[in-house]
Amino acid sequence: MKRQTRTLAVMFADISDSTSLYQKLGDAAARNIVNACLQVINGVLARYEGRLVKTIGDEVMCVFPDADLAVLAASDMQAQVSATKPGNYPVAIHVGLHYGPVLVEENDVFGDTVNVAAYLRAAATAEQILTTDAIERCLTAALKTCVRPIFNAVLKGSEQESTVYQVLWRTDRTDLTDVNLQPNKMIPGDTGALLVTLDEERVRVDQWRTGIVIGRSKDCDLVVTDNFASRRHLSIKLVRTHFYLFDHSINGTFVTLGSGEEVHVLRRELLLDGSGEIYVGRSRAERPSGVITFEPDRRSMYRV
């Protein structure tokens, strides 16, 4: 298929807290519920001229010809999932929408519009739909009453602050939280991906690979050989728009931050902000083998 540029509304819809679903119910039962939820989402698309681009784990990416259809589809998805309880279980979804130019190639779509929609999906909470002023400006008068501004953000492809809107999909709006639109009320931007390196091996944590495990076990994403390391010593995960280190070990993890400060992390989490070094089981002063480094990659974490 020939590459072409089109203006489309891009949507990401994701099942909220699906990880705990697998932990509570087990793989088979959780997967059945996830599949039932995805079927409900996909069933809505045709009614609004939507096209499924891809399914990525527990989320879907789809496109619509205009802003009205995207907002109506997202609202219908929320209503259907809330009412039907797919798989007879009370699951929820969260949705991000953006409207703008995209590069269409081989039935896939690329570009900043895609990145922004994915970012808003990550920023949204359960049962929430977040969108942009690009969508709001294009809505018909009737649908403009269904969105409200809730905070600001610097979105991918722009150096200016943009307003982020919430789509009010419920018919009963009596229990809405009042919005305080302070000028400085900003949510974190797309901070990019995190590059984690051990010796010659490098892995990237981002939207498509949201977590890695480091330890002595051969099935870890990065394998360390130090006997002070536990088999599955630590994990690094993308949580919404930030990267966290979670220690699961006996001896703890020593993290040297960009400031030079060393932090001992034992059975807790640590926000990884900027660049630094990770020492598994022993501090930097003990000269352990296998130094792990982490650094941000300022390209969008939501590249597709």
Image: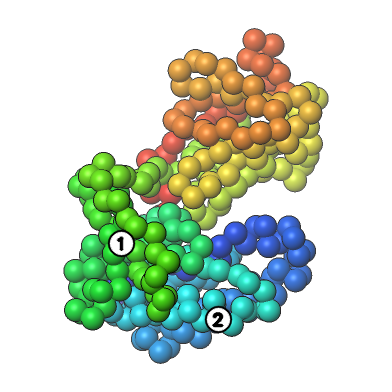
The x, y position of residue 190, in whole percent, is 37, 47
The x, y position of residue 62, in whole percent, is 42, 74
Q: Is residue 91 above or below residue 17?
A: below
Left or right side of 289 for 145: left
Q: Residues within 10 Å of mark 2 (few under 14, many from 20)?
A: few
Relative depth, front residue between 294 and 149: 149
The x, y position of residue 271, in whole percent, is 53, 34
Q: Secondary structure at mark 2?
A: helix
Q: In the picture, which quadrant includes the N terminus?
A: bottom left
Q: Is residue 269 above or below residue 135?
A: above
Give the residue number, with chain letter if any, for mark 1: 165
Residue at image x 56%, y 38%?
244
Relative depth, front residue between 17 and 290: 17
Residue at image x 30%, y 44%?
185
Q: Is residue 274 above or below residue 115?
A: above
Looking at this view, name the residue that lies furthest to the bottom: 47
Left or right side of 228 for 141: left
